[in-house]
Amino acid sequence: MSRPSSRRPLLDSYYERYLEAENSAAFIRQVGERYSVATLERLAESGDRMTRRGAVLALGFLADFESNNVLGAALRDRDRGVRTLAENAIRLVWCRIGTPSQRQELGAIIRLNNAQQFAEAIARASSLIDIAPWIAESWNQRAIAYFSTSKFLDAIRDCQQALEINPYHFGAAAGMGYCYVQLREHASAAECFRRALKLNPGMESARAKLIEVQRVLKDGE
């Protein structure tokens, strides 16, 4: 039996319109006018499937790092759609922390890594870490740059620090796994990929790599 339409949250209607029109600006405006982040967090945890999807999508647009725990839990939601939206949303809120200038700098570091300008990414991430060591994503971005320049032990240390600050950081967990693969420490790599999958069961790249590493271990390396 379906729920009477009169009792459906407005969020459901907003989400359905978003799916039809793919108008993110309208969705953000409508949800922002009606819902607080705290209410969206509650709906993400306790609403029905469509409501949870809409709430998680909205948190990705409107929330900051304070919603990390709620989105981290949504990564293990029973609904695949919620899990997928949560992965996208949580990556966004990881960058919404600190002062406006610190957020801007973090964005610049991410762009440097994407452009493969790793030396500058390391330098600027190091400066940001000195100023705001509690921003987990700055440690993760420096780890990415270290990995890309074959500094695997440095990358592992930064991934560990990112996870210490943000225990939901599945990217850092998987990143450590890739480092250990390069170091041919396959048992440690498998442990890291399992940790990443425990945090984010939908991380198929980590699942594929875990299978590969387990095969190597079974064959005796």
Image (tube, helix red, strand yellow):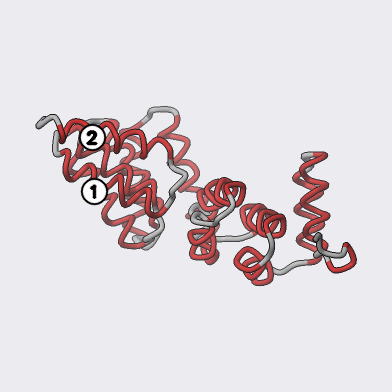
Q: Residue at label 2?
A: 213
61 relative to 177 in the view: left or right: right
How dense is the environment of label 2, judged by Cα within 10 Å: few (below 14), some, or many (20 and up)?
A: many
Residue lying furthest front in this view?
A: 1
| Residue 99 visible (yes or no) | no
Amino acid type of the residue tagged 1 in the rendering: Glu
When asked about the image quadrant of residue 120, the answer is top left
Labels 1 and 2: the sequence-earlier one: 1
Front-most of 127 and 90?
Answer: 90
| Residue 161 location (% of width, % of height) | 28, 56
Residue lying furthest left in this view?
A: 220
Amino acid type of the residue tagged 2 in the rendering: Val
In which quadrant will I find the N terminus?
Answer: bottom right
Report if the CB atoms under discs 1 and 2 are less than 8 Å apart. no
* Residue displayed at 29% across by 38% down: 210
| Residue 143 visible (yes or no) | yes
Q: Secondary structure at mark 1?
A: helix
* Residue displayed at 26% across by 44% down: 176
Depicted 114 relative to depicted 36: above or below: above
| Residue 16 location (% of width, % of height) | 80, 48
Front-most of 32 and 191?
Answer: 191
44 relative to 153 in the view: left or right: right
Q: Secondary structure at mark 2?
A: helix
* Residue displayed at 43% across by 48% down: 201
Q: Residue at label 1?
A: 191
In which quadrant will I find the C terminus?
Answer: top left
Depicted 37 relative to depicted 78: above or below: below
| Residue 49 location (% of width, % of height) | 67, 57
How dense is the environment of label 1, judged by Cα within 10 Å: few (below 14), some, or many (20 and up)?
A: some
Q: Point out which mark residue 22 bears.
A: none
Query: What whole-number distance in Å separates the C-alpha atoms at marks 1 and 2?
Result: 10 Å
